[in-house]
Image (cartoon, rainbow, N blue to C red):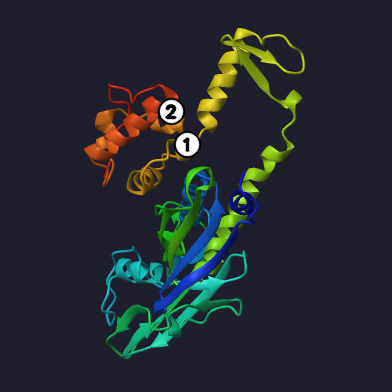
Amino acid sequence: MSRNEKSISTQVIQWKCVESETGSKRLHYGRFVVSPFKRGQVSTVGIAMRRASSEEVEGTSITCARFQGVAHEYSTTTGIQETIHDVSVNLKEIAPRSDSNDIQEAVSSVTGPKRVTAGDISLPPSIEAVDDSQYVVTITQPISIKIESKIEKSCGYRIENSNGYGDGEFPVDAVSMPVRNVNYSVHLFGSGESTRETLFIEIWTNGSLTPDEAISEASKKLIDLSTPFLHVKRGDVSHSVDNQYFSASTGSPPHLDDVSELEGNISENMFIDQLELPARAFNCLKRAEIHTIADLLNYSREDSSKIKSFGKKSVDQVSKALRERFATELPIRNCVSIVN
């Protein structure tokens, strides 16, 4: 090995922010470079960071709102320009920033005429609105309205129905995803056996987290998810030899009933993340409450195509992933009914 090759191979992987931009209070951009990696490693890291940034990084959002004297979410109130449903949608767009994991409450008590914004909401000390100018509702007459909101920290989508709510209280379809978009790219340098890779990551956030905070949180999540595998011992797993299962601790194959139970548990506990689907198809399945491979196999191709925003292309992508990764297919017969 040449001196140059040895120097490259022993370098410590480092990262730095090479570009940072604030388009608005609710749009932050960062571009990061991480290097050097061996050939093939960037794709492993890039895919993991992209998924973790989009799906595992927690954000704060309004999850419930209470309006006094309101019968249902499509009610109209004299002196208020929007319906209650429209106000709930506007509340969903507010991006709070919080360091607390507790469920907290906020109150907006305003007298019109007035254009109400996020700045008119009285927030707990540990929470702040990223953009005080975010629109909520317009009061057109000299009346007072009071909106009580519940604020929680979570990750991903949270879509709920109105069951279990009442007395003017309505759920808000929360989107607790501070990272709006993530891209990564691979760049090669060096030649021959000394070829190495550089990872470029681009992150856009809603302002509740900066891009460097988001990439740091995504890294911590990946470490936490991988930690259990560090404690796996040989005696804790089973091995398959010539299609026969043997326990590492006893050296004997389990009973056939145990094998069936094992396979059933694997199927039930395996999440659709294992399919590595495109973001559009993955998010559509999540919104349809399809979380595991077992959930997915309850849908035929025809049923799947009826899922909202889930077209033939997405069905083909799911079918291909199931076939390649689990040697199975979506059922041919209809299994469930989908209501858009």
Assign the N terminus to one quadrant of the image. top right
The amino acid at mark 1 is Gln
Q: The residue under label 2 is which amino acid type?
A: Arg
Q: CA distance from mark 2 to mark 1?
A: 8 Å
The percent position of residue 321, horizontal first and vertical second, equals 37, 32
Front-most of residues 59 and 190: 190
Q: Which mark is residue 325?
A: 2
Q: Can you see residue 29?
A: yes
Residue 167 placement: quadrant: bottom left
For mark 1, what is the residue? 274
In the structure shown, which secondary structural element does the residue marked by tag 1 occupy? helix
Give the side of residue 12 with respect to residue 319, left or right. right
Label 2–label 1 contact, CB within 8 A: yes
Point out residue 64 in the picture as x, y percentages from the top left corner.
46, 64
Q: Which mark is residue 127?
A: none
Label 2 neighbourhood size at 10 Å, few (<14), some (14-19), many (20+)? Answer: few
Q: Earlier in the sequence, mark 2 or mark 1?
A: 1
